[in-house]
Image (cartoon, rainbow, N blue to C red):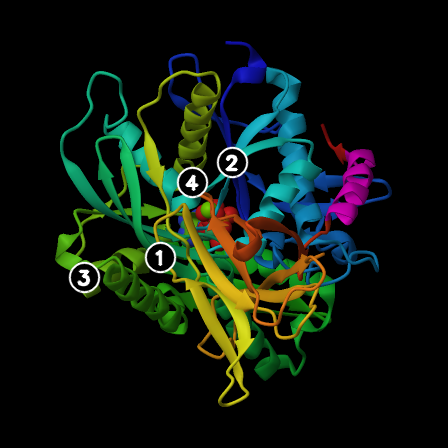
Amino acid sequence: MSSTQTPIGIDLGTTFSVVARVDRHGNPETITNAAGERWTPSAVLFEEGSVIVGTEARNAAYLEPEGFADFAKRDMGDDGYHRTIHGQLYPPEVIQSLVLKKLKVDYEERYGEMRDVVITVPAYFNEPRRKATQDAGRLAGLNVLDIINEPTAAAIAYGFQQGFLSKEGKAERSERVLVYDLGGGTFDVTVMEICGSDFKTLATGGDVHLGGIDFDQRLIDYACDQFIEKHGQDPRSEPSGVQRLKRIGEDVKRALTHRTQTTFPVDHAGYSLRVPISRELLEEKTADLMTRTVFTIRSVVRQAGLQLSDLTRVLLVGGSTRMPMVDSTLQKEFGFELDRTVSTDEAVAHGAALYAGVLMTRQTGGISGMTVQNVNSHSLGVLGTDTKTGRPRNGVVVPANTALPVTKGKRFSTARDGQTSVKVSVIEGGSATGQNSTPVGECVVRDLPEGLPKGTHVDVIFTYKENGRLEVQATIPSLKKNAKLVVQRDTGLSDARLEEWISRVEKIAVSPS
Ligand code: ADP
Ligand code: MG
């Protein structure tokens, strides 16, 4: 197998990113970065014309907070990273692409070209966030074969490990697995059915704003409150202090995984304080976060049409599941037996590499037995107006947790004689009135033929592909004709801006390498 054909999977994480590939014997292996680490912090420090990515960037963050960006994954799908970097607003996918570029550079130093890859996304990512992830790959000069949901990837790694996927030993038994993924910035729950080498997602749910960083923040806030009480000054008032507190907060939390007591050192304005912190205190300050994960589990299991007792296994993924409170909460609430046979940090990347292998075999005409079925995590709707009340209305076209791919049409009628265009606002999620929904974009059916009578039907057809990306088409049934359709996205990079950024990112050197 030549190096360009090696299946590669990338877990592009909020906090850490991991690269894996399938070795000559068909087994997934983690690829270390240039510094020999198995995971690379998804952190970027911008310098003049170049960037530093990874541990070095994190370590220098407090010296140059204005040039530092991390947790960009949380902002994916938004127009810009949540704060400016050296006064400039960067799209989050550009920051993530620089992380990918670092992974690529490090890989290529030893193994030859990195080109075709599968990148993972939280199952709960909506369509704009998925598009932004694919764009990040393109910006980094990668050919993204596909994106795959992180829990699905973890389940594939698990299935592989259990021998479900080996050529000889196709297992007969089927399992209903709950994947609990608590990472650095996101939380995902997915219920899957694994039957032999078929991986079917039954339901998924989660929270893109719940992860390890929130546990860190509670400790930081507690320590700062103690400091203010003692010295009357807030250590969070200067940016470099905030970066340092973040590092310490995370270290303290991690220490409490294997110890029951530690201290949080705070230095500010010439004063210092050592704040004692116990595991008990951490658990007390974050109990509501754990409760949120419990509610999500209940709701996802219900949406899968199952009872808790139907589950045969709980897979723990993500660094934050190392916290003892995850075990105790899940056991207390559900009596779950927890499975730690897959590596919490590497399973996602390993599953992605295995999936890349399947896709590449398929492309070359080979047969591969694995099937992966996904569901959409958010409903897809069209925003309209209720004719009776005059209020906005969310006309749901595809409900959440529908098996993918799915194609559904919605019929619209022209309101006037001679109308030449129809505009449709597409949203994901949200209430019946469209509140809290994410605008995906506007589909404008253009250049309708002249002289159409009022009330002419225009069908807009939505297809959610297996990977959760959306395709839209429009037809005029009375004319048996496809209409021209332009999707104007409300968020993320337009094609023109993407091209522009591709050439800019190309010129940014990644150091050290
Ligand atoms: P992501 O997928 O979001 O990048 P990871 O799955 O790599 O995240 O998990 C990173 C999170 O796991 C961080 O918040 C980190 O603090 C936390 N973490 C890692 N090890 C431990 C530990 N031993 N105890 C508690 N939290 C941990
Ligand atoms: Mg992760």
CA distance for labels 4 and 3: 24 Å
What residue is shown at x 43% (from left), y 12% (from top)? 24
Label 2 and label 3: CA atoms lie apart by: 35 Å
Give the number of the disc on residue 146: 2
Residue 209 in view of the camera: no
Q: Which element carries disc 4, helix, strand or loop?
A: loop
Which image quarter: residue 416? Answer: bottom right
Disc 3 or 1, which lies upstream in sequence? Answer: 3
Q: Which circle's residue, 2 or 3, is located before the other in the chain?
A: 2
Q: Is residue 246 above or below residue 344?
A: below
Is the residue indicated by label 4 positioned so its CB lies within 8 Å of ligand 1? Answer: yes
Q: Where does the magenta region start and end?
A: 495-509
Residue labelled 1 has its Cβ within 8 Å of some atom of ligand 2 = no
> According to the image, label 1 marks what residue?
401
The residue singled out by tag 4 in the image is: 345
Residue behind mark 3: 334
Type of amino acid under label 1: Asn
Magenta highlight on residue 15: no
Residue type, mark 2 in image: Asp
